Image (cartoon, grey):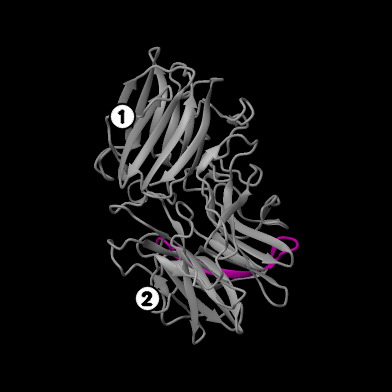
Amino acid sequence: MPTVKNPILSGFYPDPSICRVGDTYYIVNSTFAYFPGVPIFASKDLCHFHQIGNILDRPSQLPLGNDGMSRGIFAPTIRYYDGVYYMITTNVSSGGNFIVTASDPAGPWSEPHYLKGAEGIDPSIFFDGDGKCYYIGTRPNPDGVRYNGDWFIYIQELDIKNFCLVGDYKLVWKGAMRDAEWPEGPHLYKKDGWYYIMHAEGGTGPAHAVCVARSKDVFGPYVGNFNNPIFTHRHLGKAYPVRYVGHADLVDTLEGDWYMVMLASRPCEGYTGMGRETFLAKVTWEDGWPVVNEGSGKLAEIQEVGIPAEDTLPENSFYTFHNRTLDPHFVTVRNPKEDMYSLTRQAGKLALKAAPEVITEPTCASYLGVRQKSYHYTAETRMEFVPGEGEEAGLVILQSETASVRFVVMQENGNSILRVVSFGERSGQARGCAPKKEVVLSQTAFLQDSLGVTLKIMQDGQKLSFWYAPQDKGFIKIPVTVDARFLSTEAAGGFVGNTIGMYASANHAESENYAMFDYFVLTDL
């Protein structure tokens, strides 16, 4: 039987939602304040997922402003009905809950249809057999929030042709546990005459769990499974290699089997730098209830999948800039300025403008990155950049505007220097041991010429090292090692994982200077 290694989407791919159309499976994920928003992946075998685009690829679809990195897009759901693909999500930075549609999942997708009166977050939609559509989401307790996470799941009919809610909403579920915290990420299904609500509760940290309830009527009353939570790792302890399991979605196959996708995190030395990733589990049904990974009740590192394996090549992590469009894996922070980068300024190169904005503030800095996918990798680029005074360009590891590491070429007092800079907790310290601030960890003078410089960052566990190769010669190691634990959810907080990429800034000054990048490669070791 074919197998897949978990996670099926490595790196910062949280809040997965899945649907099947014919023999093809589609997954979407939250992106928070990154742009473009909501990557969409396709697969024929539930094992090999390939990114076919980004659903929210225009600023008009995704206004982000200057909110923090963990704002923006929360918990998308993808569904298909009668020839149309639907993606519903929440933009907590602007507009609230909305739906976009497409006839082709690769796009283009429509402008947002905002849903008036759809309070709360984490929306999903369900199409019943009679053609009616229902909205299910989560909202604060209407009688007043008594404690943090005192929310309800509610259902309301949705006029899908006019994108408006119909009638009154019905509070249908409060969560499986007494005084449950954060019942969220609900999805609605129908099987064998029963309506099922599957949702997460307990928050997105160590107590995260998947629970389920069912009813014979779409508006309830819903009765919880006595075996709730049906899936969690909360009982396995802090040392278990996979944590925070929850926020799941179900899908069936053409053969009639069932699977579940959900988020989970893989810490390294107790700290999670890759955020929440997408995992897969097998689902069977007993006495009308779903059972996840029967016999073990936890995620498998190697998951069997009862679908013939797709004959495919792995996605490339060596990115060149010979095309007029960026690879869909690249993301920017918030809405990029129109002149932030160019792929035509010089053939075969990415031109990244040294903008006034900086990566350590909630702005649209000149940054293009991809997701960190392991704790053992090298990130490398070759760059030509003649900095003006105070300008810099190079590589960045970004957790958020409050936690980052920069390995950059810059000019200071007329001299070109290489600098390693941490922003956040002091390098080598865990959270709370030192005040947040910028620290120059290393500074090296060097001479540039027209051949530019190659920069490389290597991560081995939670240790970062830095290398450079001037004039296409051999690599030289910078004499500093950085503890990467401060670039983690546990230390820096938030909902995002790390990205790694190219950066240029004039540090609050106006400039027309550009850094020219030949390639970017991220290699797992």
Q: Estimate the x, y position of residue 265 in percent, counting from the top left.
A: 39, 58
Question: Residue tagged by mark 1?
Answer: 478
Rendered view: 257 above or below 265: below
Q: Nearer the viewer, mark 1 or mark 2?
A: 1
- Residue 228 seen in the current view: yes
- Residue 143 seen in the current view: no
Amino acid identity at mark 2: Ser
State the image quarter where residue 237 is shown: bottom left
Q: Estimate the x, y position of residue 287 in percent, counting from the top left.
A: 49, 87
State the image quarter where residue 440 is shown: top left
Mark number displayed over residue 262: none
Question: Residue tagged by mark 2?
Answer: 296
Amino acid identity at mark 1: Ile
Disc 1 + disc 2, Cβ < 8 Å: no
The stretch of residues the image draws in magenta is 144-165
Q: Estimate the x, y position of residue 249 in percent, counting from the top left.
A: 53, 67
Q: Residue at x 38, y 79 (%)?
A: 295
Per the model, the C-alpha gap separating discs 1 and 2 is 47 Å
Task: Indicate whether residue 457 is drawn in magenta.
Answer: no
Q: Residue at x 74, y 64 (%)?
A: 83
Rendered view: 227 above or below 392: below
Q: Estimate the x, y position of residue 79 in percent, counting from the top left.
A: 64, 64
The local secondary structure at tag 2 comes to loop
The local secondary structure at tag 1 comes to loop
Decide which of tag 1 and tag 2 comes sooner along the chain: 2
Task: Indicate whether residue 158 is drawn in magenta.
Answer: yes
